[in-house]
Image (spheres, rainbow, N blue to C red):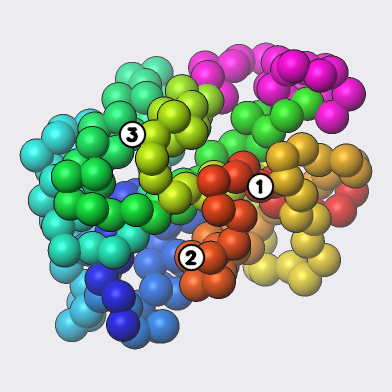
């Protein structure tokens, strides 16, 4: 089995993804800000305390890994646009090619307004664009880098149980979309790695409206 790095392992999407990776027998190196979060004791899990915006912490967590998963959230501190350039640099130094990145549906192409991203168009239901702009900067960094990325772009995330009727489209949605359970997003991230899906693409995931 592979050694994989996971950023955002204690988050509401990262935690179910962590469970899937461990259940599949992978060794996981998880970067966490605080060890107060309860992660399972597991012989194949290495917990590393640190900050994803710090270069040395990123270098430490990805050491010896064959791929990286990012379930990092964003906030007013521009976490993603700070962390991802550092991460790409360290991935290249360690010859790690594959990254699965959880983004947002806002950075998919707008379906009816050419040249715009979804968050810039009338499709967006959010008033603030701060989070989408941070996700966009991270995506553009990956796009310009020589790495094998998949950017998974979910619609509104819920805590519901997994559903079966998924809408998966790239690089834009062509149908009406509904919210998507975080557990579906975690499973899709696992499958995107396991089956090498959507290489160097953004892919939207949603429920059917």
Q: Which mark is residue 193?
A: 2
Q: CA distance from mark 2 to mark 3?
A: 18 Å
Q: Position of residue 190 (x, y in %)?
A: 50, 67
| Position in image of residue 37 (x %, y %) | 26, 56
Instruction: Give the image location of residue 52, x and y in percent.
Output: 24, 39
Q: Secondary structure at mark 2?
A: helix
- Label at residue 59: none
In the image, 36 versus 73, the foreground residue is: 73
Q: Earlier in the sequence, mark 2 or mark 1?
A: 2
Identify the residue at horizontal 84%, vertical 29% (top origin): 111
- In the picture of the structure, the residue carrying the numbered disc 1 is 203
* Image quadrant containing the N terminus: bottom left
- Would you say the magenta stretch is mainly helix, strand or loop? loop
Q: Give the magenta range.
A: 111-134
Residue 133 percent across, percent down from the top left: 52, 19
Is residue 131 in view from this perspective?
Answer: no
């Amino acid at each position: 089995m592979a050694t994989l790095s996971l950023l955002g392992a204690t988050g509401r999407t990262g935690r179910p993804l962590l469970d899937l990776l461990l259940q599949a027998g992978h060794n996981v190196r998880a970067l966490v800000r605080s060890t107060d979060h309860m992660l399972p004791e597991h012989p194949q899990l290495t917990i590393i305390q640190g900050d994803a915006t710090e270069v040395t912490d990123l270098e430490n967590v990805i050491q010896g890994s064959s791929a990286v998963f990012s379930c990092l959230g964003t906030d007013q501190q521009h976490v993603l646009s700070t962390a991802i350039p550092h991460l790409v640099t360290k991935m290249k130094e360690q010859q790690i090619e594959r990254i699965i990145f959880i983004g947002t549906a806002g950075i998919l192409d707008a379906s009816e307004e050419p040249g715009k991203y979804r968050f810039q168009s009338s499709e967006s239901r959010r008033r603030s664009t701060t989070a989408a702009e941070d996700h966009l900067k991270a995506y553009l960094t990956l796009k310009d880098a020589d790495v094998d990325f998949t950017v998974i772009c979910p619609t509104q995330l819920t805590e519901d149980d997994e559903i079966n009727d998924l809408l998966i489209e790239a690089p834009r949605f062509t149908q009406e979309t509904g919210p998507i359970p975080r557990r579906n997003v975690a499973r899709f991230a696992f499958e995107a790695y396991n089956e090498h899906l959507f290489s160097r693409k953004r892919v939207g995931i949603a429920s059917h409206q």
